[in-house]
Amino acid sequence: MKKGLLVAFLTATVTVIASAQVRQEITLTDDWQFSQDKKTWQNVSIPHDWAIAGPFDKKWDLQEVAIEQNGETEATEKSGRSGALPWIGDGHYRRMLTIPSSYEHAELIFDGAMAEPVVSVNGQQAGYWAYGYNAFRVDITPFVKKGDNLLEVDLKNVEESSRWYPGAGIYRPVTLLLTQQTHLDDWSIYIRTVSQKNGNAILEVEGRVLKPDHNVFANVALVSPDDHSAVTNREIHINDDGSFHTTLNVEDAKLWTPETPYLYNLITTITDRKGKVVDEKCIKTGIRTIRVTREKGFQLNGQTRKLKGVCLHHDLGPLGAAVNKAALIRQIKMMKQMGCDAIRTAHNMPSQWQMDICDSLGMMVMAESFDMWIYPKCKNGYARFFREWSDKDITNLVLANRNHPSIVMWSIGNEIPEQWSEEGRQIAVRLQGLCHALDPSRPVTQGMDRADAALSSGFAQTMEVPGFNYRVHKYQNNIEKLPQGFLLGSETASTVSSRGVYQFPVVAEAVDTESSELRKHHYNGQCSSYDVQYCSWSNLPDDDWVWQDDKDWVIGEFVWTGYDYLGEPSPYDEYWPSRSSYFGICDLAGLPKDRYYLYRSKWQKEDHTIHLLPHWTWGKQRRGQVTPVYCYTDYPTAELFVNGKSQGKISKNPKERLDRYRLRWNDVKYEPGQLKVVVYDEQGKQAGEQVVSTAGKPSKLKLDVWTQHDAEWLKADGEDLAFITVSLTDAKGTVIPDANDRLTFEVSGAGRFEAVCNGDATSLESFTKPTMRLFSGQLVVVVRSDKKAGNLTLKVRDSQRKISETVTLKTIQ
């Protein structure tokens, strides 16, 4: 079909829909009221996290617990385990719904509400869901009347129900769906790539019409990403139970990959015999195949590749659990620039917005479900609901997400204690079978942390993709007992570091042992950015890469974690103040740590990496002291200079643990001035250089703006965000690496201050107040657009230095 004809076809379809009022999908963003006591109400927008404003306090969810996953046998006080924010308690939301008389069916789709949401309409309970992380639907047709209706949502968060910060409130979107009595069941529509070869693909499409009659047909059109062609099957027979099925033959199919994330529009239309549209649904999807085998490993579209993945918790740092598209895009783009091509949604169901963005930007996804089954890891966790709700939750996870091409496997659990038992093996078989029944196109996995027990019980052997968390020294034994012939590093590394913090002496060690340098000194609740510290149950990135590079049967990894997250502050889970993690490749503000460039040097194949550490601005006490220098680069050889004096030319050494993927000069003595590294390619030719200088006196504030539009403007929709990195520098632009000045922020014009974060896991400053101290010389300010066009101006002040800086963004409708 030519483009002009296709546009005419789609325009005509939209016109019919509008005139017939067959469907509306309304995101219920504004006009909500929120209360914790049902006495005092405030106006809010959804998504909303009512706990993120704080204050931080040791008393919130204070737990006396032994973390078995960390090998602990005695319970101790864990003060920041779930983020030290006031997320425990009840939350209540209400708003009015207006139902036009032209619609016969009304439905609410919740993408997630924390926790145990009870949905009422006009004073009558219309629905309930136990799991705060899952999407669920509520048919409110029996409870509504034409005109205005009162919608109420009551939530309950209980103590010790999470091992990290879960958030609080309706933290994901709510959609009102209005249709006629005869309508498509949206989650029944399933698009599956059966095969692809020589540029052609075969797709199967199925769905279900609710309350059908014998006078309606289904029509399916697949519109290509360039809008130049469409494959259309018309008048598809609808069975008595409402189901229908068809096959599409797609010529010159454009395949979805992380490098080429092509998306098609699948338009499913229900019409009567006269051609009148009864209902219509448009779904973005992609054409791609997935296979995992002993011989070829993980294959996308028939091409073997190793997964270069990271694990992500659902919180967005200073924004909390309230999901936001711009923040998600920033996360995904940052990871892709590092060379990452996959995300594990640890340890729970993802948001639809996150999957939409992974589809469009090209990020493969392991969509996870649970952190526990029957045995509770924390007193009031999901184990309370598992027996009654697990099948329902897996069903909703798969049905709501199976048309996303980005999702390449399902995960039915993380470090499940039952992995040693026959009962656990049977549960794994059941849940994996349920995933396959709902979606036979994807493999199923889970992350196992007790390899010996899981192999002895047969638990690991039942999994289509056996995933192992850490303990790479057991990989060889694991593979010898696995009939699958391959394994996945479902959770790897857990290296810990604080951005811009360097500790001496530099010792590669497990930092949660009594003998560790960190445990001896505590280092003010910080970890070293030399990237040589890890937990006793984990390891360094270098250890994982040896197995991935040397063994074809290791099909990839998911690093713990891509970003720091609120809660679980290992190795400082008994130290206060400490309320967020150190595992991230980026910090809680989204700023890259040094480790970002180590992964980039290994994963990023399109651009070269040259990164020197540490900074070179130390006080008099370090003059003449040994201060090791590392270079993270994909080049094999480099020479280091201090103030023009060579410190030696070295090459990577595959025989040494820390020298196979890094270049290290361990005996450099500090003197102020200039570090310079010159790198050489495989032929010995000079290929690039980087310079790090000693900073002078603090002189100015530098503001670097990030928006999802790759330009300094925002969409005037009330939801778009800009992230402004603020750095204190000297006159030449060198960051003052130990600066902790207090800054204040003022936003004027067409927007408002949203949040601020400096990435310091020990900071108890509120994210939502317009002031914060720098950490390692930097922080990130988040501003939100208004719903009007104009100019948004951020002014940053440093009263101590008597300096300020402003930046102005346009907001465009």
Image: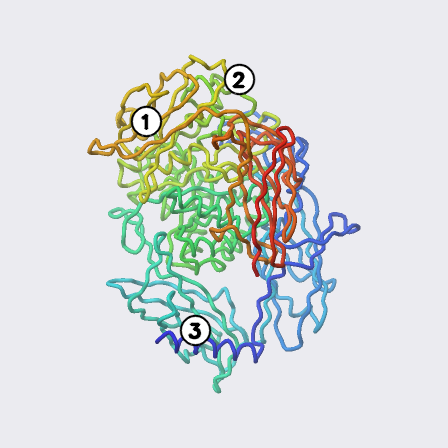
Q: What residue type is labelled 3?
A: Phe
* Between marks 3 and 1 in the image, the one whose residue lies nearer the viewer: 1
Which quadrant would residue 252 be assigned to in this image?
Answer: bottom left
Element under disc 2: helix
Q: Quadrant of the N terminus?
A: bottom left
Residues at circles 2 and 1 in contact by the CB criterion of under 8 Å: no
Image label count? 3
Q: Which amino acid does label 2 sit on?
A: His
Q: Position of residue 507 (x, y in %)?
A: 41, 19
For disc 1, the marked residue is 663
* Image point (30%, 62%), residue name: 195
* Image point (51%, 80%), residue name: 277
For disc 3, the marked residue is 244
Structural distance between the alpha carbons of marks 3 and 1: 60 Å
Residue neighbourhood size for the residue with mark 3, other residues' Cα within 10 Å, grouped as few (<14), some (14–19), many (≥20): some
**Residue 756, placed above or below residue 750:** above
For disc 2, the marked residue is 521
